[in-house]
Image (cartoon, rainbow, N blue to C red):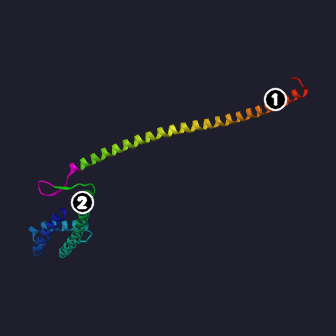
Amino acid sequence: MAVTSTFLVLLFFTATISSGLAVTRCKPHVDILQAVQSLLATSASKYGTQYSSEYSEAHSTLLRILERQQTELDRLTTAARSMETLTNDKLQQYGLSRKLTFDGRAANDIDTLRDTFHRLDEENDDVLRVLEQHRQEYVERQQKLDDLVKQLEHLHHGNIALEKNIKERNETLTKTLATNVKLERIVKERGLQ
């Protein structure tokens, strides 16, 4: 919109300059032409062209400004199309559509977007709650598993000690039985019975 209004103002002043070039030294037109020159100088510096405040260069300077302005307009139009394409892609990705407003312009349905994002936030919160619950269950099960592993280790160490004790008693019993057998044999040999 600003580009169009600037274009119209510059076009108006170009027409004014063209009609006033013949009478540039007339007092009634001097102020207008100086205002046009000031606008041309400002616009020229804004669009990167040079203007030496000569009346003879006004036309070529204005053409250069208009050319640069057209380039800028083309760039902005391309950017707007890219944004429109990106917006449409995102709307399709989230399953949304555009609405026509009362004046016929296409506009994003902000309320639908808010509702969608609110719903997505709630779903995200639900998923996070479930994940936290699963994490807590995992921690509890891991703790129970660690306790069972400790109990198994304790039982394993107890089994080792018990087996060692049984082995020692078996050895003692074997020695005792061997001693009893020897004693019985001695008793029989000596007839002490």
Q: Is residue 145 above or below residue 91?
A: above
Q: What residue sits 11% from the left and 56% below the top?
A: 103
* Direction from residue 119 to residue 163 in the image, left or right: right
* Residue nearest the viewer, comparing 81 with 133: 133
* Direction from residue 5 to residue 126 in the image, left or right: right
Q: Is residue 47 above or below residue 179?
A: below
Q: Is residue 160 above or below residue 190?
A: below
**Rendering quarter of residue 33:** bottom left
Q: What residue sits 12% from the left and 68% below the top?
A: 12
Question: To which residue does mark 2 refer?
Answer: 88
Q: What residue sits 81% from the left and 29% below the top?
A: 180
Amino acid marked by disc 1: Asn
The disc at residue 180 is: 1
Q: Secondary structure at mark 2?
A: helix
- Magenta region, residue range: 100-112
* Residue nearest the viewer, comparing 175 with 30: 175
Q: What residue sits 44% from the left and 39% below the top?
A: 137
The quarter of the rendered structure image containing the N terminus is bottom left
**Rendering quarter of residue 107:** bottom left
